Each structure stands twice: as structure tokens, then as C-alpha cells.
Amino acid sequence: MKNIKLRNKILISILFIICLFLFKNINQVKAASVPAYRWPIGGDNANETYMDYEYYGIAGQAPVKDGKSGREYKVNNKLWPNEKAYYAKCESHNGMDITGINGHTYKVVSVCNGTVIATSAEYGGNPSTNYPDRNQRRTTAGLNDGGGYGNYIVIQEPTTGRCFLYAHLKGGTFKVSKGNKVTAGQEIATMGSSGDSGHMHLHFEIRKSKEVTINTAWGGGYHRFQYANSTSNLDPKDYIGSSPKVVRQITVTKPSKTKYYEGTENLNLAGAKLSVRYNTGIIENINLPNNNVKVSGFNNKKVGKNTVVVEYAGQKVTFDVEIIAKPQPEIKYVAAKREKVTFQRYFKYRQINIYFDKPVTLGNAEPTVTVRVQNEVKTASYAGISDDGKKLMYKIYNNEFDIFTEGMMYIDCTGTVLDKENKKIEVDCKFKNLTIGKLYKCELKHTFSAIINNGKGDINGDGVVDGSDASRALRIYACRMSNEELDEIDKKNIDKADVNDDGIVDAVDASIILSYYADKSAGVTLEDDKKILKCDINSDNKVDVYDFNLLKLKIQNAVYEDTFDLNEDGKLDNDDIEFFRNVMYDLGSRKRN
């Protein structure tokens, strides 16, 4: 029994150790697969930089020599011809060295948002931010400059407490100082070779906290570095990934279609492919079109060779297509007709039709048609295309013109771009001064004052004035003409049938009743009727230019009368003229021609 308990304890201990091992490895994989921070070099040439020496901070991770673990430091005189040969026996290395091309300048940037908590300007000993580049390891001066780190900056991330050390920076290039806030990607200095450095590079460390980074016991605002080891430091390459991937070269495979008819077709990139070679040696194939790839230079109006330009990540490549001339569709003729809205007494607009010799459908634009009456010009509204595709239709509403503009109507049309079978075609669509009829004066033929003020028109006494009342007015007229007897209802209400107060009931009265009924069916309200009656200044049962002239004359003479105060504001002025115009625009109509 005792042996069984012992065995169980051993098994539990082994499982616990395995779980710890797995948990640790999972965290390491996660850190490596999704870098938490950006690359510490910025600028257009950041892709030239790379890791020079790795992190060796834990015993057993690095090559072992003479019983010690760490890194072997050797000089590559082909890259750094000015550096003297030096060999260090398995130094430990608690950061990552990043370098680039000899003679190039590189911007060092913050890998995170944070605060500058220390720089070499506060180093306890010989503080400075202008240590010179030494370009040689293990010199007395270099080891003394910033404790061997040379010019350095320490930035702490507030969310994690981690501290990021940027060392061997070039003297006199600092963009920040202690206490400054920084953002990820912000330039802080330039890569250098100050301190214990054999050649230009950035020594970059990630320490777990401020406490394991700097020792502030020196006082006076000065500090020294805490001793770095595997407990205090993290391996940077698990957190910042590698240098940026940059496009080195692009090539393009032509699309399947390379010939197009003039003005009819858009560029078809089916079959086109972009081959992208990166600085890492990786080749990526991108099918076109693609939102990240800019394609320009195609002009289907230019007959002959078109050079198409493909741009991606600052690189350009071209291929050629051919534009073939194609006959254009032509306009056969232009016609116009009058149209009226249901229930309206007058024609409200004219329709202008442009006929083509073959079916077309509109693309991104249609012909611009303008209508001119005297010196006033208006643009006709596009109203659609016929079912057979051969006719474009436009409308010009009569009341778009000034209420007192009248005369012959002329139309002009300028060129356009049309689409045949969804392919663009340039069309010569030009004509000028085609007559489409005459624009008559705007008026309100009837004010219906007798119906509104005297209750006339409701002949059958049902409370509304409608078509049945017009029928009774016609019957009364017919009976009168044929000397027939009227029925009791017509006898009783015959006075209501004389809506124009001329003493007789005839077809004119029936017409007025029908017009009134049509207005109400078209949405003319009692409030509209009251406005119309106000504008009938000379009380002739219609509103026209004569009423308008009387109003203007009264305003010019500055003699106030209630009859002319259309907006009832106690004065006569241009507001009354505007009231008159609005009534005519909203409710007036042009005489049919």
C-alpha cells in the first residue's frame, strides 16, 4: 500500500513537470508566431537591416567552448574592413544585434508606446549623449562610455512594465530625452557604433521590468545598469520578428485579351498575373485585378498601341494592348411632343426624343439637352430609354421657365459617351436650334371664385363638386336647348349650375366644374384655392400677367391696400411679388398649343 502511494506521488510529479514544460513551450511558440512589437529600425531602407548576433542569455543555448556557453564573436572584415580582428571566447549576449550595409544611415525607432525612463545622459560615471563611434571591441574608452553601451536610450512600456534598451547609438542624434512620451514607430536616434562596439549596429534588449534594468542608487538622478542575465532579459527575436518584407522586383503576365474595339470596351485583366519577388527571396503570385495593385494607362479612345502600367509597392511594370477603330452609332433624327399629366387641364411638359440608327444603352453619361426660350436656357431632364434601345427621352417642364417667359422653344444638344452592349462608344450627338413648339404664358384660367365663395357647382347637393355635377350642368344646357322639362333637383339647383355668373347654364359651366374637379383630384387644396383668389387682383376669374402688373404698379406707388397685401404682413413689398410667383410656379399652367 505504501509503495502504491509513493508511485502515485511520483506519477503526479512527473505529470506536473510535463505540464509546465508544455505550457512554457506553448508560450514560446505564441510569442514567436505573433510578434508583439515592431522591428526597431524605421525609414525607407529598414529592409536592409538584419540580425547580426543572436541572444544567448541562458546556459546551454549557445555553443559550448572551454566549458562555457555564450556566443562566439568574430570579425567579418569583408563587411567591416575598418574593424580590427577580435575573438571573444563564448561571451554571453543578453540582447540582439541589428546591423545593415556599411556606410548607410538607419533610423532607430521605438518598438512600442511608452516613456523614456533613462538615457546615457544620466549614466552614473561619465554621462553623455555624444560618445564617439569606437568601431573596435574591448577598448578602455569604449568600455567606459555608458558602461560599454555607449549612447543609449531606455523606454518602458506602461502596460507590461517591460523596458527596451537601444544601445551603441550615434552621438548627437537623440530625438528624445528622459521623461518624453513616445509612440510605436517614432524615431528616437540613429544607429551607431559607440561604446564597446566593433562596427555599426544596434544592440537591442528587452528586460522584464525597470527594477532589473537600472539601478538608481547613485542618486542625483543618475543610474547604472543592473546585471543582465537569463532571469532579467527576454529573447528579442521572439517578440519583434524580423526585418520588414520588401518588394525587390515585379513581373507581369499579359491578360488573355489584348485587343479592344475603340471606345467600346473596358480593360479585361482575366488571365493576368503579377509575380512579386521579395528581399527574403520569396516569390508571390497575384492574380489581377487586385485591390492592392494599381493599373493605369488604358485608353479605349486611343486607336493603336496602349501601354498599360501596373504598379505594386513602388515598383512598375508594363504590357501593351491594341485598340482597334470601330464605326460609331449615329443619330437619325430628333423629335419632340407635348405630354400632359392625368387630370391636368394644360400640357405640363414637352418630351424630347433622340433616335439612333441602332440600339444603344447609356453608359456613364447621356447627351446634355438644353431648351432655350428667348434668353432663358434650361437643361432638360433625362427620362429614360425606349425598350428597343433606339430612343433617348428627355423632359422639360414648362414651369421651369420664368412664369412670364413665352415664345418659341429651341433645343440644343452636345456630344456624349454611349454604351453598346455594356461597351463604351463615342457618339457625335450635336444639333442646335431645333424648334419643339411655342411656350405660352403661364396662367390660372379659372379661380373658381363662385364655387369657393358662393357654394356653386354642387348641383346634385351631395356636398362635393365632381363629374356628376358637370353631367347635370350639361343636361340642363341640353334641356334648355331642346325646351325639355327639368327634373326637380335641377330646377331647385339651377342657380348653382351657373358657375361663371353669366346668367345662363351652358357647356362653359360644365367645363369649369370639370376643371375644378380635376384640380381637386390632382391635389389642389382649399388653402391653394385661397391663394389663387388672392392673386386674382382684377377679379376676372383668372390669374395672369395683368394681375402681376397691377401688383407691381401698386408696390411702386407705395399705396397700401389690403387687396394687394397677398402675404398679409401689413405692407406691400417684394415679398408679395414672391408670393405671386410661387403661386404661379406651384399651381399655374401653360396654355396648350
Image (spheres, rainbow, N blue to C red):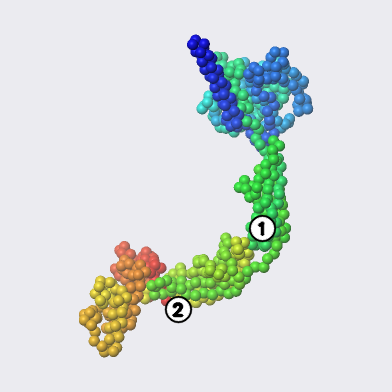
Q: Residue at x 77, y 20 (%)?
A: 85
Residue 586, quarter of the rendered image: bottom left
Kindly report which numbered mark, 2 or 1, lies closer to the viewer in this rendering: 1
Q: Residue at x 59, y 69 (%)?
A: 359
Q: Residue at x 66, y 59 (%)?
A: 300
Which residue is the site of mark 2?
593
Give the left or right position of residue 315, taking residue 491 as reference. right
10 Å crowding of disc 1: few (<14), some (14-19), many (20+): some
Do labels 2 and 1 touch, CB within 8 Å? Answer: no
Q: Which mark is residue 299?
A: 1
Amino acid under label 1? Asn
Viewer-proximal residue among 542 and 44? 44
State whether residue 345 is above or below residue 178.
below
Viewer-proximal residue among 549 and 69? 69
Residue 416, quarter of the rendered image: bottom right
Name the residue furthest front: 1
Name the residue furthest bottom: 483
